[in-house]
Amino acid sequence: MPRPIQAFVHTDALRHNLARMRAAAPDARVWAVVKANAYGHGIERVFEGLRGADGFALLDLDEAQRIRGLGWRGPVLLLEGVFEMRDLELCSRLDLWHTVHCDEQVDMLSAHKTQVPHRIFLKMNSGMNRLGFTPTRFRSAWTRLNQLPQVDEISLVTHFSDADGPKGITQQMATFAKTTEDLPGERTTCNSAGLLRHANDVAVAADWVRPGIALYGSAPDYPERDIAAWDLQPTMSLRSRIIATQDLQVGDTVGYGSSFTAEAPMRIGVVACGYADGYPRHCPTGTPVLVSGVRTRTLGRVSMDMIAVDLTPCADAGFGNEVTLWGKSSNGAVLPIDEVAQAAGTVGYELMCAVSSRVGFTQY
Ligand SMILES: *Cc1c(COP(=O)(O)O)cnc(C)c1O
C-alpha cells in the first residue's frame, strides 16, 4: 500500500471557475493560463475542466506540445515567447502564438524561415519592469515587426503589477492605452486580480483576459476577499489519513523542538503528510486543517513525513480518518488553500505548484 496521502483535481470546480471568469468579462475571450503544469494540477488533468476556454496560455514549449497532444486545435499562447531560434520551428509546426517582449526575439523572428506567418503578442513594459518594450520603444518594435514577412496579426499585451492591491492599475492602464491608442490589433491586459477587481474598467476586459489562479480556486486578493466572496471553488484537494494517535498529559510536548506543549489532557492525531509532500514546513501550530471534514489545527513542527493535529473538536476521530490539508473533504467541507498559504507566509500559487512528485493525483 502506498502512503495514504493523495491529491485530487476537481473537474466540475474548474468548469465552475472558468464560467465565473467568463461572467466577469462577458465580451472578452478567455485564455486559461496553464503554466507551471497548470499551477501544479497537471495539464492533462485540468484539460477536461478548462477546454471551454478560448485558448491556453503557458510558458513551456513542452507544455504546448502536450496541449496539442490532447487534441486541442484552438489558440495556444507562449506568455514569454521563444528562448532560442529552434523554438520558432515548433511555433510554426504547432501553430503557437507567441509573445515578443525584446529585440532579440524580433531578431530571431526575422531570421526564421516559415511558410505561414505567425500571430504575435507584442508586450509592453508599462511599469512592472519584468518583460516588454518600454512605451518609448514600443512603437518602433511594432513597426519593425509589422514589416516582417514572418509576422501575421500583431496583438498588444501588458501585465499589471498591482491589480490585487491598493496601487491598482490606473497608471499602467493609462500608459498602455495612450501608447497603443492608434495601433490596430487585439488587446489583452489582465490576470485574475485585474479581471475580478477591475472588470468594470472597459479597457481591462479588452479582447482577451488571462486568468490563472482564480481558475484554480484561490482568491487573488486574499485576505481582502476569499474564494467564497468571489464564488470560486477549490480545484485541488490534498488529503491524507491519521496513522496514529497519542494521548497527551499536561506538559507533554509534540514533535521536533518540542514547540507545542499541552496545557490540558488532549488527544492528537498523527497525519501522513509532511514537507516532503509539499506541505509547507513554515506552517506554525494553529494552521487550519480538516479531520473528517471538521475544522481543527496543526500542532508543533511539520516534519518530513508527518504532522500532528488536535483531535479535541473531533473526539470520535482516530486511526484511518480522513484529513484534508487543503481543498475539499470527501464530505464536502472546504478549507481554502489561501488560509494554509497565509499561515505559511506565502500564497496559494506556491502551495499548488509545490505538491511533490511522491503524491499521487486523482481526477474527478
Ligand atoms: C501567470 C500570468 C497570468 C495569470 O496570472 P494569475 O495571477 O494567476 O491570474 C496572466 N498573464 C501573464 C503574462 C502571466 O504570466
Image (cartoon, helix red, strand yellow):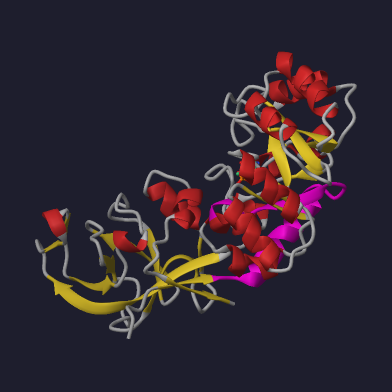
- 176 left or right of 333? right
Q: Note whether 182 is above or below 238 in the view shown.
A: above
Q: Note whether 335 is above or below 342 in the view shown.
A: below
Residue 263: give x, y in percent of width and height: 16, 60
Q: Which residues are magenta?
A: 9-36
Residue 105 sits in which quadrant? top right
Q: Quadrant of the C terminus?
A: bottom right
Residue 148: give x, y in percent of width and height: 82, 30
164 vs 80, nearest the viewer: 80
Residue 153 sits in which quadrant? top right
- 5 left or right of 108? left
Q: Note whether 116 is above or below 245 in the view shown.
A: above
- 308 left or right of 23? left
Instruction: Name which residue lies at 14% across and 58% down.
Output: 256
Residue 168: give x, y in percent of width and height: 65, 28
83 vs 224, nearest the viewer: 83
